[in-house]
Amino acid sequence: MVLLLFAWLLACGQSFAQGWPRTFNNAEGSVTHIMAPPSRILSTSVSVTGTLLAIDAPVVASATAVNGQFFGQWVAVAEERKIAKIWPAGSIDLEQVYAIAPDLIIVSLNGADSSFAHLAELRAIAPVIIVNYGNQTWQALARELGSALGLEAQVEQRIAGFDARLANARQQIRIPAGQANIINFNGPGTVNPIATPTSVHARLLESLGFSIEAPNPAWQSNLTRSGDFIWAEYENLTQLTAGTTFLLSAGDVRINEFLHDPLLQRLPAVQQGRVFSLGAHAFRVDYYSASEMVAEIVRHFPNGSMQER
């Protein structure tokens, strides 16, 4: 017993010497005290899980997308690390939480994958921290999570590696003159979100040298929400003026549909044939999808292929 007590005190002493316990300021204003470095993290937000994986956080289980799957940009990493799937976005299973026995639970404040409504039940099982991934870059979210989990060094190493990838990409590309816009193209009869210049997608493209066209705020559909996108009706796409268009989560079929859409034939980007995909997983930006987006830009705009600004 004395030896066990000594070992516990030694472990506690080491934790306190390394900055534990820690205080995390949650996105809705509350505070969570994290007594020691977590070793079994449950992510109830699939949108946050990619960033946790990127910083090598000890995630053992995660919610999925609505379709019951992890995001394609990091599914291979999740499989390699044997991350358990707990429930699809929009639902919750408290029995599974008990079975997983997490020592920290991460909840998103909002979004389709938020479990915020079940905060009290989750807090009865383990400490909970609450983040808002919708209003910040993956780098900012990584730093926020890193400070809570004691992974600051891993975070900075990952960000530095990504910055080096950006610098290398800038040396490899020559971008077209004029502005670009970013659309999640869904076609007629529904909304077609257009990224704003302050969105995480736009900020990534601007870091590579692009200038992003701002959609008219008046196009915001009353049926949808605002944020990084103006959720515009299909007809409003005809008023865009940029000479280059990027489509989110689009393959060749979707690009072809956009280029041959009868209503969009007068768009400068269509007339010049400058409509490109940002990758199959570009809608939710994390380290993995951002890396894919950079690779797509390098592929589309190799140095010497375009008129320089």
Image (cartoon, rainbow, N blue to C red):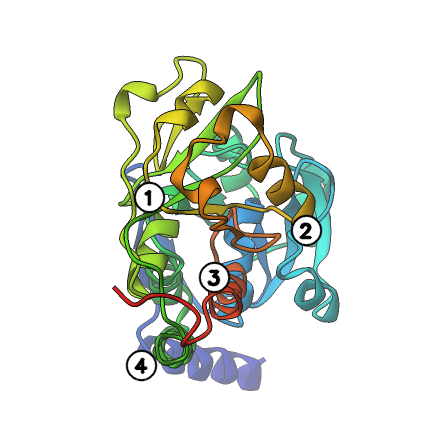
Q: Identify which residue is drawn at 36% across, 70% down.
A: 174
Give the label on residue 108, or none. Answer: none
Q: Are marks 1 and 2 in contact (CB under 8 Å)?
A: no
Quadrant placement of the N terminus: bottom right
Residue in front for this viewpoint, 230 or 131: 230
Query: In this rendering, is residue 27 above or below 280?
Result: above
Q: Residues within 10 Å of mark 2 (few under 14, many from 20)?
A: many
Q: Are marks 3 and 4 in contact (CB under 8 Å)?
A: no
Q: Identify which residue is drawn at 52% across, 54% down.
A: 278
Residue type at numbered disc 1: Asn
The residue carrying mark 3 is 290
Number of numbered discs overlaid on the protein picture: 4
Q: Is residue 89 left or right of residue 199?
A: right
Q: Residues within 10 Å of mark 1 (few under 14, many from 20)?
A: some
- Give the foreground label among 1 and 4: 1
Disc 2 to disc 4, how far (Cα)? 37 Å
